[in-house]
C-alpha cells in the first residue's frame, strides 16, 4: 500500500469511526489488557521482593519492568506520534477508559526515567563532582537524597511509593492504581464483547 492510500484510509477512519474501526476495538482492548496485566504482575513481584530484601537490585528490576509496561499503557492514551489518525485513536481510548488529563499515566517523567536512561546516566555522571555514588539499588526513605553528601543512583521507598532514578523522584503508587483501573476496565470490556464502552 502506498502512502497516499494509507493516508486516505486513515482519514476515512478518523471521519467515520473517530480513529478506531469497531471490529478492531478488540485489538486495542487486548493490547491494553496485556500491558496493564504485565505491569500488575511486576508490581506484585515487587511487593514479594520487598518483603524479603536479599538483593535490592531484584526489587528495582521488578519496579523497572512494572513501569516499563505502564509506559506501554500510557502510549495508547498519549502517543508520541501527532498525526490526526493516531491522536483520534488516543482520544477514543481515553474516553472509553475514562482516562483524564490528570491521570498519573500521562506523567512522562516516569516514562522517560527508564526509556532514556542511558542519556540521563551520562548527564548524571557529568554532574557528580563530589561524594560517593552507590551503583546499585537502595531500599529506604527517599528523604536520604536531601541529606546525603553522595548521589543516589537508584532507590525504592516502599513506604511512600517513591523511586529515585538518577536523583529524580518518581511516585509509582499513583501509576500502579491507574494501571489497575485500566486493567479492570479492559477485562470488563473484553468479557462484554470486546467493545470500547464506558462502564
Image (tube, rainbow, N blue to C red):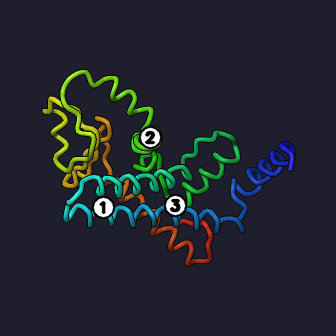
Task: Please report contact status of discs 3 and 2: CB closer than 8 Å, yes or no.
Answer: no
Q: Is residue 16 left or right of residue 107?
A: right
Please report whichever mark, 2 or 1, sits nearer to the chain's N-terminal start: 1
Nearer to us: label 1 or label 3: 1
Residue highlighted by disc 2 = 112
Image spot of residue 6 (x, y percent):
82, 48
Mark 1 crowdedness (10 Å alpha carbons): few <14, some 14-19, many ≥20? many
Please report whichever mark, 1 or 3, sits nearer to the chain's N-terminal start: 1
Residue at 64%, 52% in the rendered image: 89
Residue at 44%, 32% in the rendered image: 119
Nearer to us: label 3 or label 2: 2
Residue highlighted by disc 1 = 46
Q: Is residue 138 left or right of residue 95?
A: left
Q: Is residue 110 left or right of residue 135?
A: right
Cα separation, mark 1 vs mark 3, equals 26 Å
Say which quarter of the image contains residue 121.
Answer: top left
Residue at 38%, 52% in the rendered image: 64
Image spot of residue 97 (x, y percent):
52, 60
Cα separation, mark 2 vs mark 1, equals 20 Å
Q: Nearer the viewer, residue 183 or 155?
A: 155
Mark 3 residue element: helix
- Mark number for residue 191? none
**Tag count:** 3
Mark 2 residue element: helix
Q: Is residue 89 above or below residue 168?
A: below
Task: Please report contact status of discs 1 and 3: CB closer than 8 Å, yes or no.
Answer: no
Image spot of residue 144 (x, y percent):
15, 39
Mark 2 crowdedness (10 Å alpha carbons): few <14, some 14-19, many ≥20? few
Residue highlighted by disc 3 = 97
Q: Is residue 38 above or below residue 130?
A: below
Mark 1 residue element: helix
Amino acid at each position: 500500500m502506498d502512502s497516499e492510500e494509507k493516508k486516505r484510509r486513515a482519514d476515512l477512519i478518523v471521519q467515520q469511526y473517530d480513529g478506531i474501526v469497531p471490529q478492531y476495538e478488540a485489538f486495542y482492548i487486548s493490547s491494553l489488557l496485556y500491558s496493564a496485566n504485565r505491569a500488575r504482575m511486576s508490581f506484585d513481584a515487587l511487593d514479594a521482593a520487598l518483603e524479603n530484601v536479599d538483593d535490592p537490585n531484584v526489587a528495582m528490576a521488578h519496579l523497572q519492568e512494572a513501569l516499563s509496561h505502564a509506559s506501554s499503557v500510557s502510549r495508547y492514551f498519549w502517543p508520541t506520534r501527532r498525526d490526526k489518525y493516531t491522536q483520534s485513536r488516543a482520544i477514543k481510548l481515553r474516553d472509553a477508559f475514562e482516562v483524564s488529563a490528570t491521570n498519573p499515566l500521562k506523567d512522562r517523567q516516569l516514562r522517560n526515567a527508564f526509556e532514556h536512561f542511558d542519556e540521563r546516566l551520562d548527564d548524571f555522571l557529568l554532574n557528580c563532582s563530589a561524594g560517593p555514588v552507590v551503583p546499585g539499588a537502595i531500599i529506604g526513605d527517599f528523604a536520604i537524597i536531601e541529606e546525603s553528601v553522595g548521589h543516589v543512583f537508584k532507590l525504592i521507598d516502599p513506604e511512600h511509593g517513591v523511586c529515585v532514578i538518577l536523583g529524580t523522584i518518581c511516585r509509582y503508587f499513583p501509576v500502579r492504581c491507574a494501571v489497575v483501573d485500566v486493567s479492570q476496565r479492559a477485562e470488563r470490556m473484553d468479557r462484554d464483547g470486546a467493545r470500547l464502552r464506558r462502564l
